Amino acid sequence: MPPPEVGIVTMKPQPLPLTVELPGRIDPVQIAQVRARVDGVVLRREFVQGSDVKTGQVLYQIDPAPYQAALDSAKANLMQAQLLAERYKPLVDINAVSKQNYDAAVAAAAQAKAAQEIAAINLGYCTVTAPIDGRIGAALVTEGALVSQAAATAMAVIQQMDPIYFDFTESSTEALKLRQELETGQLKSAAPGEAKVTLTLPDGTVYPHPGKLLFSDITVDPTSGMITLRAEFPNPDDMLLPGMFAVGRLEQAVAPQTLLVPQPAVIIGPNGAASVMLVTATNSVQPQPIEIGAAVGGDWVVKNGLKAGDRVIVDGLQKVRSGMTVKPVPARVIEETSIAPAAGK
């Protein structure tokens, strides 16, 4: 009888991104609380609740009548103070008016000008505008309501929705372990511009737009032992809402020399120990105990037991035994390894 054919794969080290899944929440990039800056009665609401607004867009109109009157009075006072100062100026040269009186008239004119500017500012505050671009929520006051500068009456809240932040936390112990492995060369750092962050939404779907890691906090929360991280995601369709819970998958490092073995090739014994069948240089079958790590696609990460160049039997395991001679051929059915959703450590 000719030796039976078996499908094999040859072990080849390859770089493997190491990722970790961490829960967190969606936060707006900017949030602005629109508050009253003058006292008065609200005449009109100019926006649609729940709509997108632009910077400078009019939101409310507060009754401007008393502030317009104050501005007109300030203009009249300024004109009178300037006329008096101009009248005194030539009289000072002929000693008809004292220098002290002239200086007082000039100072009064300057104070009147400042009062006019304040009155104009207050009149401008009667028109309440949006300070940022974003999505505006419910109106917090209605027409006819009396708002107060002293109480800083809240009128609306605007949140920037695109882009949007994802804030999550990581154990300081895991972060320290990662740093040590990077320093010893066991792992390579993922380049800042290449580190990938993806999101899984509450319904289990994967958010279609990848994000980028902005920063990792430099302090550890003493109550939880966690470090805060922040990623930024595009949100063109407003799918991500502030306060939403999500799970982030963060690429932290790259294991440069990783061996992956197809899951069908791994034999799990009654005691939980893993092993594979190798084809030796003389084409004989040899069992080999291995230590496996995380699953990556249709493969297992091999921690110990295999080396580059080892030929592992994938097809035909049921017809081989230790020591028999076989005819190795490339495996016909091998689960494709998906490196993109790489396994956590």
Image: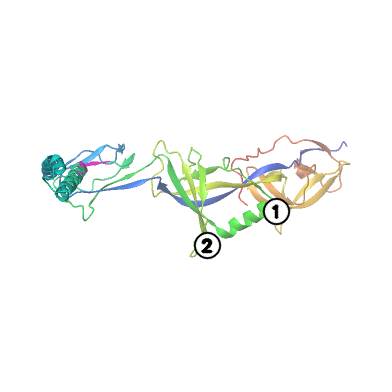
Q: Nearer the viewer, residue 264 or 68?
A: 68
Separation of disc 1 and disc 2 at Cα?
Answer: 24 Å
Q: Amino acid at mark 1?
A: Thr
Q: Residue at x 19, y 43 (%)?
A: 113
Q: Quadrant of residue 192?
A: top right
Residue that lies at the very extreme toward the bottom in this rendered image:
223
User: Horizontal placement of 205 versus 70: left or right?
Assistant: right
Q: Which residues are magenta?
A: 124-129
What is the three-letter code of the residue carrying label 2? Answer: Gly
Whether residue 28 is visible here, answered yes or no, is: yes
Task: Indicate yes or no whether the magenta region holds residue 127.
Answer: yes
Asked which quadrant contains residue 240, the reply is: top left
Question: Looking at the picture, how far across and down is residue 16, in whole percent?
Answer: 66, 44
The mark found on residue 184 in the picture is 1
Question: Around disc 2, counting alpha carbons within 10 Å, would you say few (fewer than 14), some (14 to 19), or many (20 or more)?
Answer: few
In magenta segment, residue 101: no
**Residue at (77% x, 51% y) in the render:** 305
- Residue that label 2 marks: 225
